[in-house]
Image (cartoon, rainbow, N blue to C red):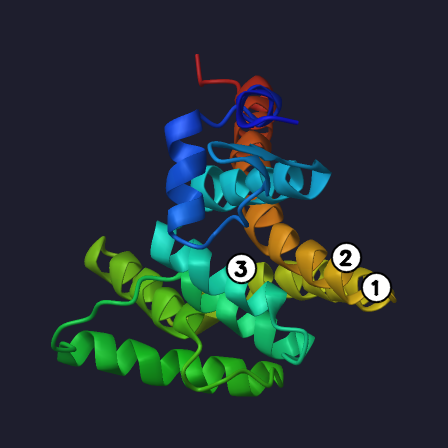
């Protein structure tokens, strides 16, 4: 297909397609003339993947490039690829760490150790979880890291199923892509489902509540 058809098929504007090629995110097509090239299903699939990372995962072009490079590295173990994706999804910039944040991080470290989770000390999600704990305390919640225990238990059940399904893939390309897409798409889906469940159960409780006359 020509670049115009590739653009129509994927919904990615031609200037953006060319930009992705310049940035190395998308392979160039097979040249058929000085100013013409042919593109195949692999190009369309790659563009769909880039769109998911950009639009659902909200990754920058640089972060997308890092994830795609990890996917393309046939020698990179799947577990390390998972780490690359996790780091891409997390904030990277950080200034001085206030005392309250340092305390929360120490509590989260102890919480994860008590769960028996083997997680990298540099895992960005550690910082994110500590930040959530600090936010709760600033809003007046007198709580410790144990407040996240129900969420941790639910997350463990979901993660075990997801990782097991990826591990069953014999084709590395398919497996690593499922890993990346699962991390990005299902993380967004989980947040959306939680909001929908809150609305549902809030409505149930409201229907059961009878104000005093």
Task: State whether residue 89 is above or below residue 205.
Answer: below
Task: State whether residue 63 is above or below residue 37.
Answer: below
Q: Residue most toward the top?
A: 213
Q: Earlier in the sequence, mark 3 or mark 2?
A: 3
Under circle 2, the secondary element is: helix
Residue drawn at the location 47% of the way across and 52% of the way down: 25
In percent of width and height, residue 208 lies at 60, 22
Residue located beneath label 1 in the image: 171
In percent of width and height, residue 87 lies at 43, 68
Residue drawn at the location 45% of the way across and 35% of the way down: 17
Quick check: 45 left or right of 131?
right
Q: Which of 196 and 119 is in front in this view?
A: 119
Under circle 3, the secondary element is: helix
Quarter of the view holding residue 200: top right
Residue located beneath label 2 in the image: 174
Label 1 crowding class (10 Å Cα cut-off): few <14, some 14-19, many 20+?
few
Quick check: 140 left or right of 23?
left
Task: State whether residue 187 is above or below residue 45.
Answer: below
Residue drawn at the location 52% of the way across and 48% of the way down: 26
Separation (CA) of disc 3 from disc 1: 17 Å
Label 3 crowding class (10 Å Cα cut-off): few <14, some 14-19, many 20+?
many
């Amino acid at each position: 297909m020509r670049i115009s058809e590739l653009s129509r098929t994927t919904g990615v504007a031609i200037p953006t397609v060319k930009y992705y090629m310049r940035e190395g995110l998308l392979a160039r097509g097979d040249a058929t003339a000085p100013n013409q090239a042919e593109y195949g299903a692999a190009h369309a699939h790659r563009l769909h993947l880039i769109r998911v990372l950009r639009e659902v995962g909200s990754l920058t072009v640089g972060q997308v490039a890092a994830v795609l490079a990890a996917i393309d590295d046939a020698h990179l173990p799947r577990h390390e690829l998972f780490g690359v994706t996790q780091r891409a999804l997390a904030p990277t910039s950080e200034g001085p760490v206030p005392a309250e944040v340092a305390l929360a991080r120490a509590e989260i470290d102890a919480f994860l150790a008590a769960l028996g989770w083997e997680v990298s000390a540099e895992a960005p999600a550690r910082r994110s979880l500590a930040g959530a704990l600090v936010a709760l305390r600033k809003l007046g919640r007198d709580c410790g890291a144990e407040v996240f225990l129900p969420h941790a238990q639910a997350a463990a059940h979901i993660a075990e199923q997801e990782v097991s399904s990826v591990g069953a893939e014999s084709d590395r390309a398919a497996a690593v892509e499922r890993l990346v897409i699962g991390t990005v798409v299902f993380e967004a889906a989980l947040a959306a489902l939680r909001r929908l469940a809150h609305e549902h159960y809030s409505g149930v409780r409201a229907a059961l509540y009878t104000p005093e006359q």
